[in-house]
Image: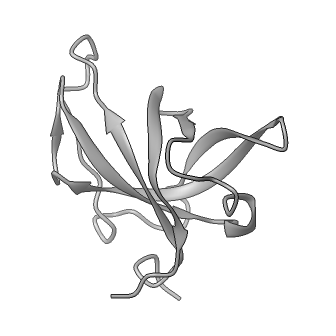
Amino acid sequence: MTQRDAPFLLARVHLPFERTTPFLYRRFGDNVGAMDGSVFNFQRAGEPVDAYAWWETLDPEVIGRGGHGVIRIVPMTPELWGHLKPGTSLAMTLERLQAQVTQSLMENQA
């Protein structure tokens, strides 16, 4: 199963104006492989969880400083993510960004 075939979530992310990073871009296949996951933090049964997932920018493909966009998140351990519903907050730990789930975990129907 490839990252494109795996279950995924969609989340909205904001890249603040004050960030030194001018834009956010990541695309599966552009040197994003098994070891290029990020740590996401969220609550599960009232407890904090750190879980790894791959992600890519979706719409727009490049999120500029001060902009918002949607990312596709492909969990490495989907069973940890199944309870997340739209509106749930996620912390992208390594990137120091916040995201909000807009679409729950689902199988890719493409």
| Apparent side of residue 8 relative to residue 20 in the rendered image (left or right) | right
Whether 108 is drawn above or below 79: the answer is below
Tell me residue 7's x, y (percent).
53, 75
> What residue lies at 56% left-to-right and 41% top-to-bottom?
88
> What residue lies at 16% left-to-right and 51% top-to-bottom?
60
Tell me residue 46's x, y (percent).
83, 36
Q: Give the colour scheme of this rendering.
A: one colour
Tell me residue 79's x, y (percent).
74, 67
> For this rendering, which residue is in front, 54 or 45?
45
Query: Can you say which quadrant of the picture contains the C terminus?
Result: bottom left
Whether 100 is drawn above or below 102: the answer is above
Whether 31 is drawn above or below 21: the answer is below
Tell me residue 15's x, y (percent).
28, 28
> For this rendering, which residue is in front, 4 or 110?
110
- Quarter of the view holding residue 28: bottom left
> For this rendering, which residue is in front, 32 or 61?
61
> For this rendering, which residue is in front, 64 or 100?
100
The furthest residue to the front: 86
- Quarter of the view holding residue 18: top left
- Quarter of the view holding residue 47: top right
| Apparent side of residue 97 relative to residue 12 in the rendered image (left or right) | right
> What residue lies at 51% left-to-right and 81% top-to-bottom?
107
